Image (cartoon, grey):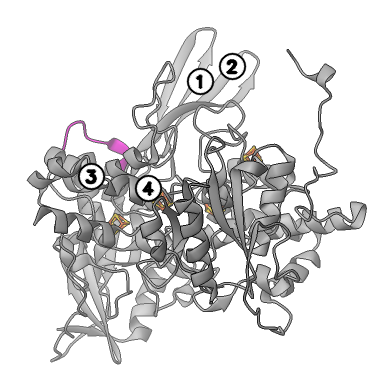
Amino acid sequence: MKFITKTDLSAWIDAQITNCEVVAPIEHNGHYLYEPIQSSREIDWSFTRPILPVKEYFFNPTEQILTFTKQWGNVTIHETLQEDQRIIIGVRPCDAHGLKVLDAMFLDADPLDPNYKAHRDRTLLVGFACIETLPTCFCTSLGEGPDSTDGLDLLITPINDGFIVEPVTARGEGLAASMGWVDREIEKPAPPEMPIIPFPEQGAWEALFHLPIWEQTAERCLSCRICAYVCPTCRCFDIRDELIAAKDGKQEFERIRVWDSCASEAYRKIAGGHNPRKAKAERLRNRFYCKFDYFPSQYGPLACTGCGRCIELCPVNIDICETLNQLAEVVT
Amino acid sequence: MNRTEQIQETARDLLEREKVNCVIGYEPGSRGHARPAFIYKAEDVERLTWDETCTHNLVRYLLKREDEYLAIVVKPCDARAINVMLAENKLFREHIYIMGVKCEGVKVHGNLQDRCQRCTQRTPVIYDKLIDGEPATISYDTPVGEIAYKQIESLSPKEKMEFWLEQFDQCIRCYACRQACPICSCPTCLYERDDSHWVGIGIGVSEKRAFHLGRAFHLAGRCVGCNECQRVCPVDLPISMLNQKIHQEMQNLFNYTPGLSQTISPLTTVLSPEEVLP
Ligand code: SF4
Ligand code: SF4
Ligand code: SF4
Ligand code: SF4
């Protein structure tokens, strides 16, 4: 196995920082976030799952899709795609899984999303296997695990005195080539275990649509947007043209795409004011159906990776595992 | 009887006599922290609980249900929010039955909340039934939040601006702070981004700054200091410090504490009938 010491890995990271943007987990207000770093010293190596998934670097909270200027009826459009290379270090396997889910919609289905693709192409993913799990983690129930390599370019597994380096893709091989690793006889540590959460099969959901559980669970929902924004697979967005500057009859606009959430009250409101998902229960139900029925039937994969963020961060304890357990009981 | 039993008994009595159609209280959550519970039938009252994890301000759930008769479990800080909402005619006193709990503070992840470290009340200012207990007398070191607050106060205006812009930068504009707030009760929030004419839709620093500073001003003399906004924030931004700052100013100028009685904030403009557009 390829083995690298912390000193050598840090030196490699610092060398990368001189070439391109490097994003890694750092501590902020007592939790972790993926942020651009200037030095490997900023990384907290004992980081747990960051509050926001790496999704924010591919499907940005606010993405400028294009800019356009308007003058005396003439419109000129400029597409704004980013190309600079970037490396994200410390990607958790559940987040890499989340990107595979997003790929199914943004890349594999028509139409291809050029902004998402540009970010995917320009970003290398260096994963970190989880040697510990949080009480809310349940990724093994959704088909991946704390040591999964799926979706990553390279996986790093922390061990006692350093790290095991495992390239996954050709791009990952390229990264590993410049790391100062040595060959060493080591056993990969067994991944930590976690509870298995049952959930209804895709075909079973239709029968669950009118259960009272939706109303009962949603009654305490605040209709905030936390659960969608922190989810590695939630991908709803809204698009708006906003004025940036106006001068001498020339107006400059930007078209931006921003995160949206099905939990918010106006999410489904349509012209004329009708709202087909006016009730909180209808919106919460949509969240579950989207993840376990609608998305998989349209694009393939289930739209949950078991990262547990929505459980940890929901202010009123709406717990996806609890609800899935209850639903599975109804089905069997 | 302990407080859980008193709450259950009161709830059972109210539901059996059909005095209310729903009791809003707390039940044990799935991960060791209590959560809001809505009880409609007397046989369900055993779900209700009281413990030190009953952090939520349930007054939020009274709003937009004016036609119903509701009972609610409140802590002293929550009770002040009821007073503010009553003064603003957003609740009807005769429609709500208040179970006021004597409280010695609530905890998140085992930590006594900042608001509780500052609290001097322990007994709700308004209730129909006092849920009695013996709030332990706890002595505290200077609360952590107080230290952080003083630290920000000591900064220069430029440094303050830098500090807050850095905080707002981390905000994800999830609106959880507003959604959990018992006072943010406007039919359409000025800073709502969907269909907005006033703020941009972007999750950018300028939109977030407008929202946070605007919200703090809208809550001047109305914020009861329950700190729900800060508790629910997924990225743990110290936003309640903004409200605390305005509260300090209100104290200095008007010696006014929101929610102690049913009075409108000295900063709230009340239009006389002839000033209102037909
Ligand atoms: S656990 Fe929650 S946040 Fe994580 S992927 Fe599933 S739905 Fe999304
Ligand atoms: S995080 Fe919780 S309260 Fe907020 S919208 Fe999601 S389920 Fe509702
Ligand atoms: S921020 Fe202001 S406008 Fe928005 S709900 Fe609160 S008080 Fe109303
Ligand atoms: S809860 Fe926190 S992240 Fe969400 S809008 Fe409020 S300050 Fe921003």
Q: Nearer the viewer, residue A5 or A331?
A: A331
Instruction: Quadrant for the N terminus of chain A, please.
Output: bottom left
Marks 2 and 4 belong to one chain: yes
Kindly check if marks 1 and 2 are in contact, taking CB atoms under 8 A apart as contact.
Answer: yes
Q: What residue lies at 51% left-to-right and 15% top-to-bottom?
A: A70
The residue indicated by pointer 1 is: A69
Residue A255 in percent (x, y) is at 45, 29
Mark 4 residue CB less than 8 A from any atom of ligand 2: yes
Which sits earlier in the primary sequence, circle 3 or circle 4? 3
Q: What residue lies at 49% left-to-right and 75% top-to-bottom?
A: B109
How crowded is the residue under tag 3: few (<14 C-alpha within 10 Å), some, or many (20+)?
A: few
Kindly check if marks 3 and 1 are in contact, taking CB atoms under 8 A apart as contact.
Answer: no
Amino acid on which the number 1 mark rests in the picture: Thr
Q: Which label belongs to residue A218?
A: 4
The residue indicated by pointer 2 is: A250
Q: Decide if residue A222 is in sight here.
A: yes
Marks 1 and 4 belong to one chain: yes
Marks 3/4: CA–CA distance: 12 Å
Q: What residue lies at 23% left-to-right and 54% top-to-bottom?
A: A304
**Highlighted magenta segment, given as a residue range:** A107-116
Which sits earlier in the primary sequence, circle 1 or circle 4? 1
In terms of secondary structure, where does tag 4 sit? Answer: helix
Marks 3 and 1 belong to one chain: yes
Q: Which label belongs to residue A211?
A: 3
